Amino acid sequence: MLVACACAHSATSMAAAQAPAGPDTIAIANVARALSADSMRGRGPWTPDADRAARYLADRLSRLGARPVFGTSLLVPVTSPERPRDTVLNVVGVLPAKNGVITGDVVAMTAHLDHLGVGQPDATGDSIYNGFLDDAVSIGMILDVARRFVQAPGDRPLVIMFFNLEEQGLLGAKALAARPDAAALIDRMRLLIGVDAGSPAGEAMEWQIMGGVPPNAGSRIADSLAHARGWTTTASPPRPINDVYVFSQRGVPIVFPIPGKTWRGYTPAQRDEAMRKFDHYHQPSDQWRPDFPWTGTAAYAQWLWEIVRAATDAHVKL
């Protein structure tokens, strides 16, 4: 368990007092459904489908008032050594702090916009790997946090990054981090929150906080807020399983939550049955379904908001 700090408890109270209305699970579901629709063809690597997803997300962020970080567009073209002639699109934007500035220290969030595309069919003949939980729901949660941040901005700006080619070895994040003009942004990042570990069908009561070893101010905030909700946490060092790892290797403190096996109101057998029904990692059946329960997503999205609200408060030292 991480050690909670007094500043995090103070920020917790402040965040609760100033927070806008709770997460909008209908909006989260709509984003996830749009991104994981068959028409998106699984947002495969180096495809126009992933580019369409990027443009969709850039439009959503633009409507929230996000400003470009690189050049004049939220769409950031990058190439990779693996396929240097093929350009893909990352999405990077910054939401201004309450005083309207986008300079100085920032807090950032990321989820990956790509998935596996079209591949081997399953037993039903379905060959589109839609990527509903991996990672469309996470994107929906981040957009929900962004919406709430616009309603109640913090003292520090919030940067949103949706990366391409995560499924191909974090190539989109690596390409962006390698840009000479990315150093200034990386140097200003005081916390990067990654969301890419699925959204449990029930409220997870235990979490692993990857990036919490060694502890950083962000992981202490996340831990404190989790314990305020009656959850337990364990900490682990960064691992190369998500785009956040690329930035951790450049010295950026990260928080990457991974839900555990204990869910509120579920027996172990009920939890296992829900996993069999809804959690189809890297399968064509990882797709939107009308009976997916959003209780776990609501709890997760609320926790993410509380972390961001506390971390963007100038009274909290990062």
Image: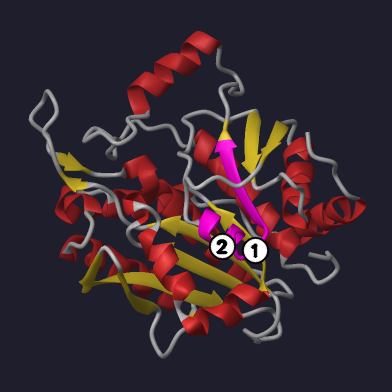
**Kind of residue sitting beneath label 2:** Phe
Magenta residue span: 244-258
Percent from the top left, x then y, of residue 264?
61, 23
| Residue type at the position of mark 1 | Val
Residue farthest toward the right in the current orientation of the protein = 6
Q: Which residue occupies the foreground of this view, 121 or 58?
A: 121
* Residues at discs 1 and 2 in contact (Cβ within 8 Å): yes
Residue 288's tag is none
Residue indicated by mark 2:
247
Above or below residue 260? Residue 155 is below
- Tell me if 78 is positioned left or right of 296 in this view: left
Expressed as whole percent of the image width and height from the top left, the position of residue 166 reads 37, 54
Q: Which residue is at 59% across, 56% downward?
A: 193
Judging depth in this view, the residue of 282 and 286 nearest the camera is 282
Mark count? 2
Residue at coordinates 11% horizontally, 33% vertically from top-left?
121
Going from the N terminus, do you reach mark 1 or mark 2 first? 2
| Residue assigned mark 1 | 252
Q: Determine the CA span between mark 1 and mark 2.
A: 6 Å
Residue ranking furthest to the left: 125
